[in-house]
Image (cartoon, rainbow, N blue to C red):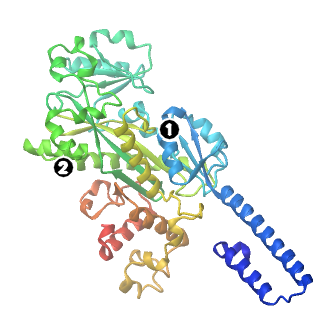
Amino acid sequence: LWSNAHLNQYEIVASVFCSALSNMRRSWIKYVLSAIAFATLFQNFMLYILLYRQQSTNKARTVFLCGPQDRLQTVQTVSEKVGFSPSNDMETADLVWGLECSWNYIFSKMKNMGSHQRLNKIPGFNVIVQKAKLSTRGYPFMPKSFHVPKDSQALKSYMKANPKKLFLTKHPNHHSVSLVNALDLGQWEGYDLLIQELLHPPYLVAGHKFDLTMYVLVTSVNPLRVYTNKKMMLRFCTKLYKEFEVNPYSSPLDSYVVHDHHFSHAEWIPELRNFTSLQFAHHEALAAYIRSRGGDPDALYERMKQMVLEVILDSLHGLRKASKEFPNAGNSSFFQLSRWDFMVGQDLQPFLIEANGSPHMSSHNDKNIIRCSRYLFDAFHLLDLGSLGGDALARERDFVTTVELMIGSEPCQTCFNACHLRRCRLCFQCISSHMLNTLSTAYIENQNKGTYERLFPLTRAREHWSKVGQHNKHLTESDVQLQDWFNGMCKQDQDFC
């Protein structure tokens, strides 16, 4: 009784005590017995409170942070605010968040992770976030890239055929960047380097080169669910690009290379300050600037999102195969919050530069910390990782009823003996328990998007993306069913469109 009446303990004790008083007679024996009874009740009640508090503490969800603690400070702060307690045990933690943490180490600790545990790394995602693997795939929307020494001969041939092109050297696993002269190529042949064509001429704002960063959240690979954050960020070179154009090889690095933490410069560029000072987001300020010059920022942003989805879809088979190395994990056990960096050409054509699988969420700038905290908080909320008050283990998806998930009431009337038909597979009499579970999760994700928007399954506005639609060769029956469900829900509720 007591274990199921947490809010009624005082009422129970009070009623017992009052009942005892009402039946007492004036005999001193009765008083003594009543006092003993009351003392016993009070002692048991206080013991229960202590035990209940201990149980609540034990039930608190735990987070293990793997990586440099100074760079994980924002993650730690946000995770604690949504109800997580720090843990020293990776194998038993409810949430594991890795930043610059060896995948081999994570795998050795988490290969037997349970379906209730969450990990911020999707197995196999390194084919996307490793510079040398992504940039050498040959995508037309990425600058031409070569991984030397393996691609040395191909690089020499390309440089000879394109003598006016400029190239940057990048370490495959680090952020160091520099301009390379074709005449000095020989000195690089003994190193493991990525050499990438420099995008020239770029689109400039007030004479400055910049890049756009987009945060992408993949919540599942089977079936695939992808979201992008609507609040894109701008990073500017601190020096004018004309300094680079006058003499590229003697120009300052800051005239043509964007550094990781130059977000604040978007707020002192005069042409953007009129908007950022009024608290408009970076991408909105850039959109206003582009429109004032006759450009179409919406087309630019949509093309960037299409590139993201194309890369993920091309990698999907490998991601699903790698996830099978975790036999006890669920389909939603893994997620990945990554940052995708884009440059913009002079003709407003975007180019994907790289995807960062462990985006730096800490900063010395207060505004950047607030922005990163918002990215994280909305990601936690979308992933149903937020606390629901007193019960630390409760999830919003636990309160989703089957009634909320059903679509197509009229067609389903004819599906009792036709579950093999596509239009019937989401009807209650045909749907699998696995898909029903997936729909509950997708329902909550849609309700909790915050500053994120759904990229896949496709929204109604992106149905024309036939190249990355449901006929893509990498998609499975579960992907098609989920797309059908969102389409059906869209007819009932505009929030799903």
Residue nearer the viewer, 74 or 8:
8
Query: Total label count?
Result: 2
Q: Could you tell whether 95 is left or right of 132 in the image?
A: right
Q: Say what amino acid the circle numbered 1 marks.
A: Gln
- Work out whether mark 1 precedes mark 2 in sequence or the reverse, and give the earlier one: 1
Identify the residue shown where x is 68% and y is 79%: 11
In the image, which is nearer the foreground, mark 1 or mark 2? 1
Q: Mark 2 sits on what residue?
A: 299
Q: Mark 1 sits on what residue?
A: 73
Q: Quadrant of the C terminus?
A: bottom left
Q: Could you tell whether 243 is left or right of 41 in the image?
A: left
Q: Quadrant of the N terminus?
A: bottom right
> Helix or strand or loop: what does disc 2 sit on?
helix
Residue 404 image offset from top left, x and y in percent: 43, 77
Residue 177 image offset from top left, x and y in percent: 35, 21
Q: Is residue 135 above or below residue 469?
A: above
Identify the residue shown where x is 25% and y is 46%: 281
Residue nearer the viewer, 25 or 352:
25
Residue farthest right in this picture: 29
Residue nearer the viewer, 240 or 477:
240
Could one spot residue 26 in this view of the protein?
yes
Residue nearer the viewer, 155 or 117:
117
Q: Is residue 137 above or below residue 175?
A: below
Q: Measure the C-alpha gap from mark 1 to mark 2.
A: 36 Å
Q: Say what amino acid the circle numbered 2 marks.
A: Ala
Q: Could you tell whether 9 is left or right of 469 in the image?
A: right
Label 2 CA crowd tier, 10 Å (few <14, some 14–19, many 20+): few
Residue 106 image offset from top left, x and y in percent: 60, 40
